[in-house]
Amino acid sequence: MNRHVNNVAGRLSLRSPQRESLEVLARICEIAPPTKDADRTAALAAIRSEFAGVTDFEREFPSICFALATGVGKTRLMGAFISYLYIAHGVRNFFVLAPNLTIYNKLISDFSNCTKPKYVFQGIQDFAINPPSIITGDNYESQARTLFDRPEDCKINIFNISKISSEVRGGKQLKMRRLSEYIGQSYFEYLSQQSDLVLLMDESHRYRASAGVRAINDLKPVLGLELTATPFVETSKGAIPFKNVVVDYPLAKAMADGFVKEPAVVTRKDFNPSGMSRDEIERLKLEDGVRLHEQVKVELETYARQTGQPIVKPFVLVIARDTAHASELLRLIQDDTFFDGRYKEHVIQVDSSKTGVEEDRMIQDLLAVENEESPTEIVIHVNMLKEGWDVTNLYTIVPLRAANARILIEQSIGRGLRLPYGKRTGVNTVDRLNIIAHDKFQEIVDEAKRSDSPIRLQQLVLDASQLEQNTVSVISTSAVAEQLGLTEPQVTLIGSEATSPAIKPIFATEAEKQVAKVAYEVIRSFEGKTDLAPTVASLQKKEIQEQLVAEVKRRLGPQQQEMFAEANAVAAVVAKTTKQVVLGTIDIPRIIVVPKDEVKSGFKLFKLNLTSLRYPVPSDELVAQTLRTGEQESISLGRGGIEEQRLEDYIVGGLVDFDDVSYDDHSDLLYDLAAQTVAHLKGYLNHDQDVRKVLRVHQKPISALIHSQMMEHFWEELTGYDAEVSKGFTELRPSAYTANAKDTVLDYRQPPSEKSKIGQYLFSGFERSLYRLTKFQSNTERMLAIILEKDSLRWFRPAKGQFQIFFKSGHEHQEYVPDFVADTDDCILMIETKAGGMKDDAVVAAKREAALKWCEHATAYSEQHGGKPWNYALIPHEMVAENMTLKGLILAAGGA
């Protein structure tokens, strides 16, 4: 079992709740094997013995529910279930049920289109060779022949619930239940007779009505797998929870684990709705939602450009009371007085008032809202966006429908929780879903604080002045790129009033600029040719210049060369371009660190601390309580499940499930730890059989406790590392910043009036910086820039991805971006500024160690080719003052 689970989980890169669900399915297949003639009562008893939450299948066949929060990945989990059952148990017939047309079409795409990123079987080798046959409610008649031609294939039937409902419509039986001449019976009947039909129910809370239940029961599957984010049925008397839940992973847990966005309720500072009409409140909420949207749009673009990720185009969801209200809102947003008519062509209305061609267009516009080319930035809807509309770019919700706080929370956020990059980024704007709720703010906050609330909302109080600001995303490119006329600082999204001194290009004519552009591209191609051009200065050697000129001419072609009258004109432009690149670049090699030989690792022998391990003996009895009378009855269970020959085998079996534990390499240690655990359990339990019961039921948490202690005794034996230099020098990456469109660019020599807000401003006026524009996160950094302007040859603030230095933080490796890099007379300095008390911080120490290692390898390469050494300096904030010299700072900080 574990081998197949590990295989599928690894191939599909399952998240922890998805993997846990797959492990539960595997265990259920062991204790209650899904077969056509299985005893339903016995199967329930076996499953309930390990999963106490399952008190009733609520179907005429064994059916279990996996309740996973929206955004965790239920569709991929369905792919994992099918892959596991096909590979491990030879199941070949599956029936996937969709509650509506939207989900039906989405499932068909996700299960059949192997070229799309959401393909659910991506990486499953068995299906790469022989993909499953996808049979749908639209093609099952034409696909009937494949049922017999290739019986060994995996067959996945995807149907909308309406296709299998047993209700008679217009006096006629549904087509699926009619006789098919090719198979000699109806397709429905054929499926119901399969000995291995497994039913997967997406959004299973939608199949609890009587008609749906009857249709599902008629299929007679051997096992039902239900998936939903809401494991309860709403009735007039309240919500009735499911009785067959085996995995419950609620929204609060998904938020805590970082699998979805963090919803935040938003209001204005000092907002008081008294004295405002409903229309005035609605308009203010709508306008503030759009203002916040414009800020979010800029922040998302800035993040994408900083990290090299695709740009996410966010949109606003406005929830209207009814269709008439939605139409009013549409007219308001399309009016020239609403943000100067900026959203006139960027808003759509989604409700039941549309029919025919208009409805088709509306649905297409809605489904395309994630595409970067889609103009839609505001969606007005009236209770139509339910399950199946999965988007990752919803960032602002403006609920204008009257509702109590709980309904507002649960119904508003469901569609906006998915993360655009699949995981949290650590950047609040990218990871947050905003709900504009001026008049409901306190009510929603109070509701979210209730002990039974499904979530914990953030609180975001905005200053009115913040909302009025127009922000822009500014791309600061290197000065050399601007001087060559290759680019200029870009301001996107909203027109900027920000100003900075113009830079004079070194080439005047368009012909020269064209040659310079090609020359720069050719120079970049030499970054990886360390044998020819180990440093940027080596590009000026005669033989390299000849190669550059020849390649530039080849790329230009004869026609473009004819624009130059003089024979050596192209060579002159190439030489001038090369000189400018050399002057405007610091040699930053691209270094890849690899182990010299095989890395050996393992765990030392140690004594376990098991003082907290005191599990009682599990009971062999179940308690059944009659719902009507309340009478209770005890039911004794027989022995079942897999029993290991030795008690220690339970522990060893649990430990080898961890990816970093190899049985072949660690068997002696594993049995030693297992023996310690068994001895501890025997110390307080009376019989070996009691120990066996504890180990069977609690194998997983016991193994996890032992594994956590093993990690404290992990060792790694290294023979050293080699540094491979893949590039001798690298292009300076552009930096992306967010700024207020109406702010002027500040002179770096003058501190801003509010130093606490220094991170909001752009600075310029530098002479020795390799970038014209930059930002500082503190006034200390601004003062250090003043010192670097005096005492260094050239300097810059690196962009993310420039150095490719990584340090370990917890279990993850994160990128380290130093604050400054400065070229001096005798060395190149990598500088980090930190508060004095932070010097011994674990993260600061890890960054320093990684940077020192990089500098060591960079120095070896640089000195080999006649260059300067690289040094690292960690400078305390309190030492930085404008009267200090760079050497004085380095010495005071303990040297570089």
Image (tube, rainbow, N blue to C red):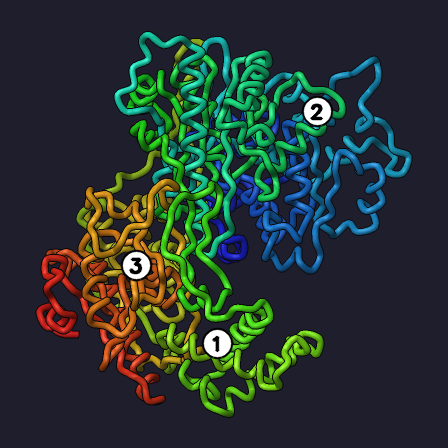
Identify the amino acid type marked 1: Thr
Q: Quadrant of the C terminus?
A: bottom left
Q: Residue furthest front?
A: 565
**In the image: residue 888, left or right of residue 366:** left
Q: What residue is shown with label 1?
A: 577
Between 719 and 217, the one nearer to me in the picture: 719
Q: Residue furthest right?
A: 181
Residue 396 in percent (x, y) is at 45, 31
Mark 3 belongs to which amino acid? Answer: Gly
- Give the quadrant of residue 137: top right
- Considering the numbered disc 1 on the image, is that residue within a helix, a strand or a loop? helix
In the displayed structure image, the side of residue 453 where residue 324 appears, left or right: right
Q: Secondary structure at mark 2?
A: helix
Residue 229, position in %: x, y? 49, 31
Residue 481: image location, x then y, percent: 45, 66
Q: Cα distance, mark 2 to mark 1?
A: 57 Å
Pick the front one: 254 or 779: 779
The residue labelled by disc 2 is 359
Residue at image coords 44%, 13%: 403
For marks 3 and 2 on the same chain, the one whose residue lies earlier in the sequence: 2
Reading the image, the residue beneath label 3 is: 765
